[in-house]
Amino acid sequence: MSGRNGQAGARPGHVPLVELERATFAYGRTPVVVDVELALEPTDFVGIVGPSGSGKTTLLKAILGSVAAVCGSITRAPGLRIGYVPQVASVSWSFPVTVEQVVLMARQGRLLPWASAAERRDVAGLLDRLGIEDLARRHIRDLSGGQQQRVFLARALLNGPDLLLLDEPTSGVDFRTRHEILHLLAGLHQEGTAVVLTTHDLNGMAAHLPDLICLNRTILARGRPGDVLTPPILERTFGAPMDVLDHMGVPLVVDPGARRTTAPRGGSA
Amino acid sequence: MSVATFLLAADLLEPFRYAFVRNGMIVAVLAGGLCGLLGVYVILKSMSYIGHGLSHAIFGGAALGAVAGINYFVAAGAWGLASALAIGRVTRRRIIGADAAIGVITTASFALGIALKNRLPQSGKSTDALLFGSILGVSPTDVLVVVGACVLVATAVFLRYRALLFTTFDPEVAQASGVSTWQAETLLMVLLAAAILACMNVLGVTLIAATLVIPAVVARMLTSSFSTMLLLSTLIGAVAGGVGMYVSYFADVSSGATIVLVGTAAFLVTYAATGRRHRRRPGPVEPAPLVLVDDRPRPAAP
């Protein structure tokens, strides 16, 4: 997989899944993400990194289509199917729905409230594949963070999307679950689904992705972690000086200020 | 059957000898079930204040209609529908003070209704019946209207079940998935207006919000499945309506009050019985701390 540098429409006659040209997105009159040039290809597996308030979620929602461009353009490939996994914190966990009821929300074509035999098979197959088949009738709150993440991943996957968007898929989960989610997404990517996710976790998540977008109100850089997780780009993105160490070929970002406070976790590099 | 049992049964069934009581019972059961069903959406979308306001707005429409000599259902219906759509519009814009705007629109309408009723005490239905509900206020036409409202709401909820569920749970993702959330939300407001209009005679303006909320809250404590909650809430509402109306006859108390009190009793019993189980439930997941220095063994980059 090659790193990309954010130039749209590189090859003539080729249609990307989603293409943003000089696109600006706003809530009310406040522009949140400005002047974005971005092309997403079927082979992409991209992480969007940036500080809080940098517009990561907005950019994801813009790709999804729930936030409209106030200027510039956004073009989606005809018939494009997008699966969206919302941030765990945005879900109303006290809502009375079971795991299978959430997953079935993705199917809206049928008039009858209950699932058809084919729908039940599809839902069961997907839950089985994600390893949560025995949780189908559980309430969504009675699950661990990783299981909750899989429920919404199952809903996003039910209609076989070409592009999967995930907002902070590893926030609020432990190390092992983060590892499992990363592998799950890598597997989906290898089967041909384009994956775009946001993350604030530079070392645990972003450094392991093949392709990164550094965002702070606009796209500052795009490329492989080794190419964009560099002190100058990180400082422009996060507004604070950061050191980058090499850890067995994987960049390791160190915040000189935060390092002291996390020092008792054990020696590194 | 012994004589004592026969006398007891005759006494307890005595109210049903009167046609107005039978009408009142039918309407109370149907109205209770109807409000129970819609109440699920009302509490899950945090719309109980809207239900409360809507019934007050409809009261103003009813009073205006009485003054102008227009049929109650036509006048209150048109007014209620207009208020419902206005409220829907205000709340969708998600601007600060949406609840205040609802308060102004609906209480102004209510105040207008009270003023008109005070000046023209003979016009239309009695103020007491409209405010607190009355078994005496139920005519055969009312029965037909409530039956009609039940058929309308049940059909709409059945056929739009999936869109309504997705919109209620997660409007943003629903819209991005191709669901017309505007349509679903407008449908809910129209159904709510229709239900309030049809049930107002029995339940009363001031108490209808409680009949929307209580059965759904009780059902929520008993189940975590959406479809089960819809059925349970409808059932609880219908039973509370029937029992409340029956008690209203014997206690000589406004039917709206007894129906709400029966529902409240059901709520207290359920709360006491399930409280411990609910308190033990795990809360939402805590976000993991941001770790900038991380020395775990890593997999090879994919």
Image (cartoon, rainbow, N blue to C red):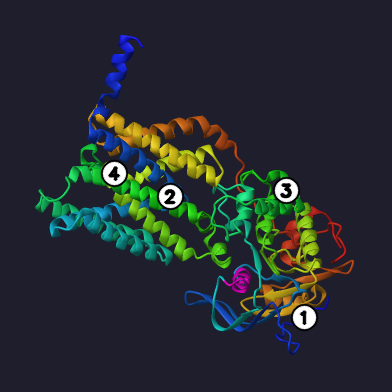
Q: What's the residue type where badge 3 is placed?
A: Ile
The label shown at residue B154 is: 2
- Tell me which residue sits at (52%, 34%) in the image: B275
Out of A126 and B268, give the one closest to the viewer.
A126
How far apart marks 1 and 3 lie (CA) works out to 35 Å
How far apart marks 1 and 4 lie (CA) works out to 69 Å
The answer to whether residue A20 is magenta is no
- Tell me which residue sits at (39%, 34%) in the image: B239
Q: In the drawing, does residue A217 fall left or right of residue B267?
A: right
Please provide percent x and percent y for residue A14. Answer: 74, 85
Residues tagged 1 and 3 counted as in contact (Cβ below 8 A)? no
Q: Is residue B55 above or below residue A202?
A: above
Residue A218 in view of the camera: yes
Which residue in the rendered view is the most extreme toward the bottom? A12
Q: What's the residue type where badge 2 is placed?
A: Ala
Which residue in the rendered view is the most extreme toward the front? B1
Mark 2 or mark 4: which comes first in sequence?
4
Point out the frontmost of discs 3 and 2: 2
Find residue B202 and report its image quarter.
top left
Label 3 sits on residue: A132
